[in-house]
Image (cartoon, rainbow, N blue to C red):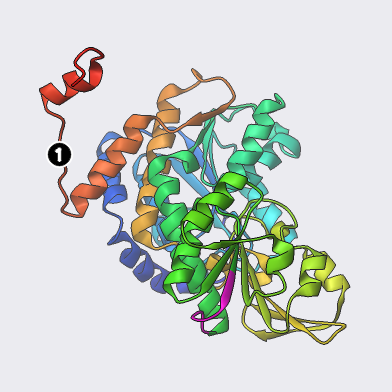
Amino acid sequence: MDYDVKDISLAKEGALRIEWANQSMPVLNKIKERFKKEKPLKGTTLAACLHVTTETASLMQTLKAGGAKVLLCASNPLSTQDDTAASLVKNDKIPVFAIKGENNKTYYKHINSVIDKKPTHTMDDGADLVSILHTERKDALEGVIGGTEETTTGIIRLKSMAADGVLKYPIVAVNDAQTKHFFDNRYGTGQSTIDGMIRATNRLIAGSNFVVCGYGWCGRGLAMRARGMGANVIVTEVDPLKALEAVMDGFQAMTIKKAAKIGDFFCTVTGNIHVISKDHFASMKDGAIVANSGHFNVELDLEGLVGMQKSTRTIRPFVQEHVLENGNRIYVLGEGRLVNLAAAEGHPSSVMDMSFANQALSIEYMVKQKKALSPDVYPVPPKIDAEIARVKLLSMGIGIDKLTPEQKKYLASWDMGT
């Protein structure tokens, strides 16, 4: 079996960590049990480009239980947990191509390694796999029937491809499922980003000016958690509605130009490029800590920062010190990549349970649809979303009410009035 991991001897430790994650993933475990019996993915070859974490391992085990031939590579050079990768190879016989800290050349080599196996389906987080298939590896594109996409950034890219008429197969936008972005993006990103920033720096959040760039679901979650830690939270936005919402939620809203001068901590969660630019770095105070929790490190103008520094060094693991000409020190966490995965362990397994349940059921949906769908980006079917929420509530011991026949009739009528 082909694979490329850091150290296969880490498999025992990885297996224990995967077991620990599995204990908090009841929805995915229920799907896995059904998949074992029904084998709905039999005959498929599934290339997954995801963060190689313990939660992802649980998803890979579920897909294999469903009959798929599974291949996994990393969707970010710094997000791989090497013991998890080793365990998947040794204990689950799943080919993994991922090493934490791999350079760009190796990163794309690993993506090509899963493409080499001629997948029938793709599972992406950021759309790098899909992008390579449509540009450099068109030789493998013809056999791809469908796929899924995990994150906001990837969906933006895929919708752009669909609008330009270049997307060659249908993809389900898993990120847009309510049981994904309402919970994973808000509660998962909120907690894990703070976790990564604290692990990397061991600095006190309370009493600081904490700047959140972007007030989408990830930004909402991060702002909420930073305030919970005692920070004075400042939000920067380009969307007036989101900025207004941030203000109504009790946060300050201002331009990044103004926030750059007063912030102690900065974190971008926008999906856009150069949200914090060279000029913003130049106006930051000595000791400012800068991180990114959007998918790509382009949210920070790191080239601009390097061009204005007089020296740099790694002062702590995942903490790069950039000393500017004026003597001010700017600290960039995790090379500007996803700080929650570079410096911590990513989202808690209980929230990834719903995200990856969406992945598993959406791939099953794509397999059942076969070639019935034209190349485009599709929503997760509402029935899947509702079923995941129902099972999650049951796993938490929570019951909810049902509409009575009288209530259903009332909601469907137009003439009952008062």
Displayed quadrant of residue 283: bottom right
- The amino acid beneath tag 1 is Asp
Up-down: is 395 above or below 42? below
Up-down: is 263 above or below 277? below
For the question of whether residue 283 can be seen, the reply is yes
* Percent coordinates x, y for residue 221 in the rendering: 46, 59
Asked whether, in this view, residue 37 is left or right of residue 91, the answer is left
Up-down: is 12 above or below 363? below
Residue nearer the viewer, 270 or 120: 270
Could you classify mark 1 by the number of other residues whose Cα lies within 10 Å: few (under 14), some (14-19), or many (20 or more)? few
Task: Report the magenta residues as a range.
Answer: 204-210
Q: Name the residue under label 1.
A: 401
Asked whether, in this view, residue 330 is left or right of residue 115, the answer is right
Residue nearer the viewer, 258 or 19: 258
Q: What element carries label 1?
A: loop
The residue that appears at 51% across and 59% down in the rendered structure is 52
Residue nearer the viewer, 25 or 399: 399
Residue nearer the viewer, 50 or 340: 340
**Quick one: quadrant of the C terminus?**
top left
Asked whether, in this view, residue 148 is left or right of residue 365, the answer is right
For the question of whether residue 8 can be seen, the reply is no
Up-down: is 312 above or below 73? below
